[in-house]
Image (tube, grey):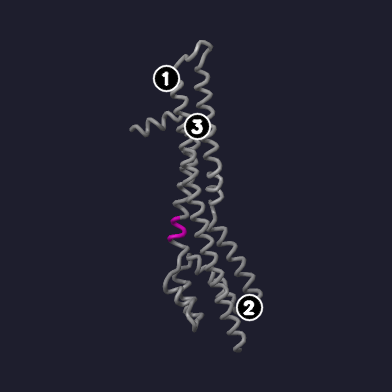
Amino acid sequence: MESWQALKAGGPSLYPLFILALLALTIMLDRIWLFWRHVRWQPAMKQALHSSHLSWDAVEQEIQKAPRNYYARFAHVLVTQRQRPLWWVESRAQEAALELEQSMGRGLWLLETIVTAAPLLGLLGTITGMMHAFNLIGGNGLVDPAGITGGVAQALIATAVGILIALVALFAFNYFSRKQAKALEEMERLGTLLIDHLRLSSESI
């Protein structure tokens, strides 16, 4: 209850901050679901892809079991194009990796924007709160001591909320950026592995 009263004292500058907080939370939940559900190795698929005696039929079967998995989607491009020249396969693999990178990074630019925007909105609340407090100081001294206190409280609360939102968004942005980079590294290794198998297959013919 006291926390709610304190937030109410923050004034109208908190409304855009709450919108930013809701937006950041939505993006974080969406990225958590994506990485937990679709950007992780399925054990059977990983075993089939990393087998020393790779079976293309076995790989295709595992890909079909998890068509929305990002590693499966990347491998699918190489597997279905394996009859074409290697330069063609490598080009399609690069396009697929770029598409998946953009999909994994969707919304991260908003988190990065919130990291900058939230403290600035908090600072705006600080300025308006202090202006309100100074307007209550007349030529004969303090006109409304309670109003002075309220203005200072608005300034401090808006600043604190803005910094808190920015910190949460910053940690989330760095975390998901790292997850994205690790996934792309895995795809790069996977692409190299499959192309090496294609080279061996072409040399043995």
- Please state which of the two labelled residues, at mark 2 or mark 3, is closer to the viewer: 3
Q: Extreme front residue here?
A: 141
- Residue at the spot 46% in from the left edge and 31% down from the top edge: 156
Residue beneath label 1, please? Answer: 146
Disc 1 crowd rating (10 Å Cα; few below 14, some 14-19, many 20+) is few
Q: Does the magenta stretch include residue 34?
A: yes
How far apart are labels 3 and 1 at the CA level? 20 Å
Mark 2 vs 3, N-terminal side: 3
Q: Which of 43 and 132 is in front in this view?
A: 132
Marks 2 and 3, Cα distance to the nearest angstrom? 59 Å
Label 3: which residue? 13
Instruction: Please tell me which residue lies in front, 107 or 133.
Output: 133
Q: In which quarter of the image is residue 10?
A: top left
Ranked by sequence position, the earlier of labels 2 and 1 is 2
Q: Residue, x 65% and y 74% (percent of image)? A: 88
Q: Identify the amino acid type marked 2.
A: Arg
Which quadrant is home to the C terminus?
Answer: bottom right
Identify the mark nearer the N-term, 3 or 1.
3
Q: Position of residue 18 (x, y in %)?
A: 46, 38
Q: Residues within 10 Å of mark 3 (few under 14, many from 20)?
A: many
What residue range appears in magenta? Answer: 32-36
Of tags 2 and 1, the one toward the viewer is 1
Name the residue at the bottom extreme.
Answer: 205
Q: Residue at x 50, y 48 (%)?
A: 170
Q: Mark 2 points at which residue?
A: 84
Q: Is the magenta stretch mostly helix, strand or loop?
A: helix
Residue 204's x, y, as percent? Answer: 59, 89
